[in-house]
Each structure stands twice: as structure tokens, then as C-alpha cells.
Image (spheres, grey):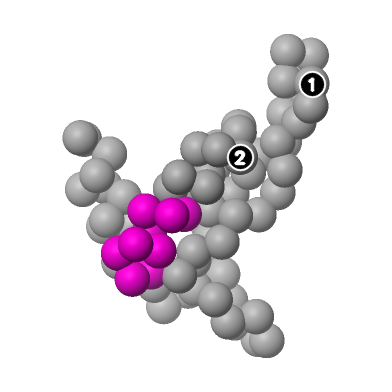
Amino acid sequence: MKTDTQKFKTVATFNDRLQAEITAGMLRENGIPAGVFGADSSYPSLGFVSPVEVKVNEEDYDAAMQLLSETSGQ
């Protein structure tokens, strides 16, 4: 992923990092650079859950969303 002035767009949000990493890995395996941003909480049972986001480069957003919609029904 580019990091200088590149803009990122969120393609998925999760409550745990593992699911975010799996999704980002699937995108990467299909040629779409993806990163995981944020951290899951150590105390989800207390309601302290911060979202973990999967982001892609702005120009890859449409392809990533298409791939995620195709794979979500499997």
C-alpha cells in the first residue's frame, strides 16, 4: 500500500482483528493491497469494542467491494 499522499477507503469493519486480517489477506491474494487499521478491545464483554477496519487504496475500492460482495455469499 502506498503511504505518502495516498487516500484510503474502508471496505469492511469488524469487532475483532482476526476477521479483519482474514479479509485483508483475501483481498491481497486477489491482487488488491489492503491494510488493517485499529485494534480490538481487551474487554469486549464490557462493551469496550473499537472497530477494526480493512482499508484499500482509493483506486482499488470498487474492485475490493466487488470481490467482497462476490465472496460474502459463500
Residue for badge 2:
17
Up-down relation of residue 64 to residue 52 (above or below): below
Describe the element under mark 2 as helix, strand or loop.
helix
Name, please, the residue furthest toward the top: 45
Depth check: give the residue in front, 5 or 40.
Answer: 40
- Residue 30, image x, y percentages: 30, 64
Work out whether residue 62 can be spotted: no
Report the amino acid beneath label 2.
Arg
Determine the CA span between mark 2 and mark 1.
14 Å
Q: Tell me, for residue 43, which label it has, or none.
A: 1
**Label annotation for residue 56:** none
Q: Amino acid at mark 1?
A: Tyr
Question: In front: 10, or 15?
Answer: 15
Residue at 59% over, 49% down: 53
The magenta stretch is 24-32
Placement of the C terminus among the 4 image quadrants: top left
Q: Is residue 38 left or right of residue 16?
A: right
At x 56%, y 69%, the residue is 8
